[in-house]
């Protein structure tokens, strides 16, 4: 929880930020050598902003323009390492850009978030600006090298690696990246690493339990145009189609009933979904088998929304036909990759009642 110390209005005289020395100390304590508590860090920042706005010490806009808050916010979200949190970074950072002159860290963290949201042209531009703003910040060169290689500038990528190694001689990430650039690795391959050499070795050898989550995040970086066109042809989304906001959604007709489909990913990841799995989901929708369902003996519902996850999970949200209370207006069930029910309200056995 946020510190209960007496807080002045506006920036703290010792930090030049709305964050006090005690706030920064707490955030630093969340960064342990063994485990870092990024969700805790993010929660602290959000509570800090909410409490400060409610107390009248500053406005939300002032908080969003605060460079230190932006740096910590991006650090927490980016290290959580999931698409939704990279997206949150991209929403938060622009307001503080006017205060980021000379701060390579700001440009690096923003460029990373843009990369993992598939906004590669913007990421490239900010990465280039970052090394101009603060050429002595090594990790700006690391990310720029990857993006230069991705956009076909192999010589420029190798130059960026050399600039980075001059700042951190013998660094594992730069040495690994240099070999991958030489080998013509893709941007996704260059991103499939951990910072720690031991952890990275475990990842490359297939022993990391978080590998699937990392691959799901990496899937959001580049778009397979053929895969995306295949999706468009299969589902034929109409004029209400929204992409990358942060998800992809549209209404889809099922037996004359409009059902909202939400693919919980951006178009880059959408373009890489298994086509056979997508066809199966369309067949299940078109069959009408999902259209109605009973939540219990007393309640039934009509399909309102289908949520498709990056891990090929499916969640069905039903609007109760005759809700017995406001708390029972909707109910939700979850399906696994094979379409089997994995969770259902009031049904501990998981049977498809």
Image: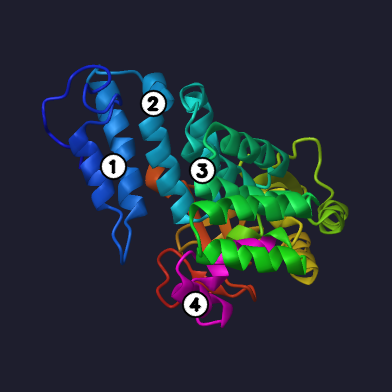
Tell me which corner region of the image, top left, top right, bottom left or bottom right, holds residue 175: bottom right
* Displayed quadrant of residue 289: bottom right
**Residue 66, numbered circle:** 2
Magenta residues span: 188-216
Residue in view at x 37 percent, y 25 percent: 63
**CA gap, disc 3 and disc 4:** 25 Å
Query: Counting residues from the N terminus, which is met first, the one under dot 3 or under dot 4?
Result: 3
Among numbered discs 1 and 2, the one appearing first in the sequence: 1
Q: Nearer the viewer, mark 1 or mark 4?
A: 4
Instruction: Tell me where residue 277 appears, x and y as whole percent.
Output: 74, 69
In the image, which disc is placed on residue 208? 4
Instruction: Using the image, tell me which numbered label, if any, was put on residue 109.
Output: 3
**Separation of marks 2 and 4 at Cα, in angstroms:** 37 Å
Looking at marks 3 and 2 on the same chain, the residue that comes earlier in the sequence is marked by: 2
Q: Is residue 319 left or right of residue 49?
A: right
Report the residue marked by disc 1: 44
Earlier in the chain: of badge 1 and badge 4, it is 1
């Amino acid at each position: 929880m946020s510190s209960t110390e007496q807080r002045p209005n506006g920036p703290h005289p010792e930090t030049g930020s709305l964050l006090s020395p005690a706030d920064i100390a707490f955030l630093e304590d969340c960064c342990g050598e063994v485990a870092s508590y990024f969700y805790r860090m993010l929660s602290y920042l959000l509570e800090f902003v909410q409490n400060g706005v409610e107390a009248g010490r500053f406005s939300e806009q002032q908080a969003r323009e605060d460079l230190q808050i932006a740096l910590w916010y991006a650090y927490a979200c980016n290290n959580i390492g999931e698409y939704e949190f990279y997206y949150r970074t991209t929403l938060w950072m622009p307001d503080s850009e006017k205060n980021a002159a000379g701060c390579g860290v700001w440009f690096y963290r923003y460029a990373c978030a843009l990369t993992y949201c598939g906004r590669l042209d913007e990421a490239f531009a900010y990465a280039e600006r970052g090394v101009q703003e603060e050429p002595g910040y090594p990790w700006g060169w690391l990310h720029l090298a990857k993006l230069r290689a991705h956009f076909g500038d192999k010589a420029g990528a190798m130059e960026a690696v050399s600039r980075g190694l001059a700042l951190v001689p013998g660094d594992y990430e730069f040495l690994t990246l240099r070999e991958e650039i030489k080998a013509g690795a893709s941007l996704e391959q260059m991103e499939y690493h951990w910072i720690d050499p031991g952890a990275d070795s475990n990842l490359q050898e297939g022993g990391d339990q978080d590998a699937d989550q990392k691959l799901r995040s990496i899937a959001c970086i580049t778009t397979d145009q053929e895969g995306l066109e295949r999706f468009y042809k299969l589902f034929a989304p109409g004029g209400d189609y929204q992409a990358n906001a942060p998800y992809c959604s549209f209404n889809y007709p099922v037996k004359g009933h409009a059902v909202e489909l939400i693919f919980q990913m951006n178009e880059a990841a959408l373009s890489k979904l298994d086509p056979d799995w997508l066809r199966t989901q369309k067949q299940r929708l078109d069959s009408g088998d999902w259209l109605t369902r009973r939540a219990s003996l007393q309640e039934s519902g009509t399909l309102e929304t289908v949520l498709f996850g990056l891990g090929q999970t499916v969640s069905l949200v039903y609007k109760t036909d005759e809700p017995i209370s406001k708390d029972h207006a909707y109910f939700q069930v979850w399906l696994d990759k094979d379409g089997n029910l994995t969770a259902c309200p009031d049904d501990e056995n998981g049977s498809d009642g």
